[in-house]
Amino acid sequence: MAHLWISGRQKAWLAVRLPDTGVALFPDRERPVRTLSPSSPPSAVRLRCCGPARHAGPVWVLIGGATHPVRVNGDPLSTGLRLLRDRDEIQLDAGVRLYFSAEEVAEVRPFPGATEKVFCPRCKLELNPGEPAVRCPAPQCGIWHHQTDQFNCWTYSGGCALCGHPTELAGGLRWTPDQLKSS
């Protein structure tokens, strides 16, 4: 699940998981991220999930609000829409800065299935819908591995069979905005 990093009260960054329904963003330092609902004002900047990419996670789009200017990585949202990439900075009025992250935490969950057959990169066997599996949390990867008693393909070695991302389960997020150099 993608998330937004927001600056907390004591300048520490907090990760807020993004629901598939999306969120509304406001230039409010106390509460910049709010649940998106039919009653959200049309002036709100919206962040919506547009469905999954082929192997990676969902695609997220930022939709500009009617009255709130928004910038992504310092550039104005001139077209009103922007597909977000991992670690994009979103700037709202009042100095509100957020960072979008597509990184996930590795967790065992039922494989959702796909329109085409998907094969585990470690054992090379097909993944079947409903089987316990882990999707590599690296934003650039997203490949699924078995994780059953018989096939512990995700935790078999220290890294993803495709990209090498560490394979600890529920190991936490690896990137935070604190890792950015101050400008």
Image (cartoon, grey):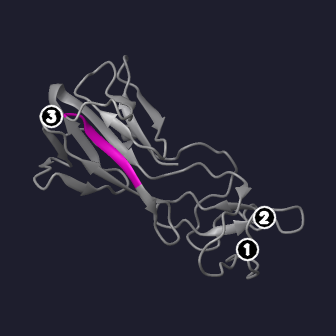
Q: Quadrant of residue 147?
A: bottom right
Q: Residues within 10 Å of mark 1 (few under 14, many from 20)?
A: many
Kindly identify the amino acid type of the residue bearing the numbered disc 2: Glu
* Vertical arrangement, residue 160 with respect to residue 75, above or below: below
Q: Position of residue 14 (x, y in %)?
A: 44, 30
At numbered mark 1, what does the secondary structure look like: helix, strand or loop?
A: loop
Q: Are marks 3 and 2 in contact (CB under 8 Å)?
A: no
Using the numbered discs, state the Cα–Cα distance from disc 3 to disc 2 in whole angstroms. Answer: 45 Å
Q: Nearer the viewer, residue 8 or 112?
A: 112
- Quadrant housing the C terminus: top left
Residue 131 disc label = 2
Q: CA distance from mark 2 to mark 1?
A: 7 Å
Residue at the spot x=73%, y=62% of the render?
Answer: 133
Which image quadrant is residue 161 in? bottom right
The amino acid on which the numbered mark 3 sits, given as a three-letter code, is: His
Dots 3, 1 in contact, CB < 8 A = no
The reply to whether discs 2 and 1 touch (Cβ–Cβ < 8 Å) is: yes
Measuring from the top left, give residue 25's x and y in whole percent: 29, 34
Task: Give me the residue at 41% from left, 43% from top.
Answer: 22
The answer for how far apart the CA atoms under marks 3 and 1 are is 45 Å
Closest to the observer: 122 or 110?
110
Crowding around mark 2 (Cα neighbors within 10 Å: few <14, some 14 to 19, many 20+) is some
**Residue picked out by circle 1:** 127
